[in-house]
Image: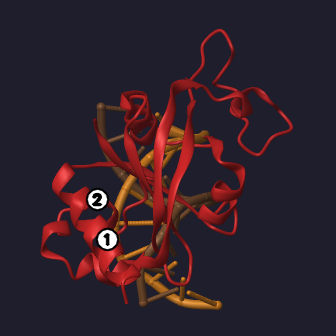
Chain colours: A red, B orange, C brown
DNA sequence: GCCAACGTTGGC
DNA sequence: GCCAACGTTGGC
């Protein structure tokens, strides 16, 4: 099993929306490196839902990967914001995965907590200027973030 | 709103 | 293939 962090602006789609929907198709990733990471995902992998561009930004909860990467249909739709003429049904460029809601943290693990944790010092999303919306993390990092969430929830 | 960092585009 | 210009991301 692998572990991931997936970012989304909560004003667009939040952990609350995912909790309501149960599962959703994670679409609109238009970065090759992030796409390649999505291709590496396997059913059953665990992912954190990270609220980016939020006040405060941080990890809002967990989800599981419910389906492997499949072509992102929005890329084929000229009227859609995520349309990309480079991607066709015959030769799809972009992919989406289905994610299932697992847990919403009682308290968001904000970015300051992440930065203040030694075990998380090499997190890609903490690097200055980082813009990758899908990044892998290792098991120790997963557990470190879960520990932050659990200690906050017990407050 | 600011701005640093980064990816993409397009002229050459 | 290089690289400047530009647009976007995302923390602050």
Q: What residue do we see at 64% from left, 25% from top?
A: A86
Question: For residue A112, which numbered disc appears in the image?
Answer: none
Measuring from the top left, give residue A33's x and y in whole percent. 39, 39
**What kind of element bears circle 2?**
helix
Rendered image quadrant of residue A117: bottom left
Residue A74: image quadrant is top right
A115 lies left or right of A20: left
Which residue carries the number 1 mark?
A: A128
Tell me the CA gap for discs 2 and 1: 9 Å
The chain carrying label 1 is A
Q: Which residue is mark 2?
A: A124
Disc 1: CA contacts within 10 A as few (<14), some (14-19) or many (>=20): few
Where does residue C10 sit, x and y in percent of width and height? 48, 69
Residue furthest to the top in view is A90
Chain assignment, label 2 = A
> From the viewer's perspective, is A136 left or right of A11?
left
Question: Where does the C terminus of chain A fall, quadrant-wise?
Answer: bottom left
């Amino acid at each position: 099993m692998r572990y991931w962090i997936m970012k989304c602006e909560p004003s667009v789609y939040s952990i609350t929306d995912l909790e309501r929907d149960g599962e959703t198709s994670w679409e609109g990733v238009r970065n090759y490196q992030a796409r390649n990471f999505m291709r590496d995902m396997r059913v059953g992998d665990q992912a954190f839902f990270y609220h980016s561009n939020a006040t405060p930004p941080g990890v809002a909860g967990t989800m599981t990967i419910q389906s492997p990467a499949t072509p992102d249909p929005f890329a084929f739709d000229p009227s859609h914001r995520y349309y990309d003429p480079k991607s066709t049904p015959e030769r799809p460029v972009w992919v989406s995965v289905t994610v299932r809601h697992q847990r919403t943290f009682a308290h968001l693990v904000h970015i300051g907590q992440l930065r203040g944790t030694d075990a998380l010092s090499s997190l890609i999303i903490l690097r200055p200027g980082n813009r990758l919306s899908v990044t892998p993390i290792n098991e120790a990092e997963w557990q470190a973030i879960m520990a932050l969430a659990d200690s906050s929830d017990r407050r």
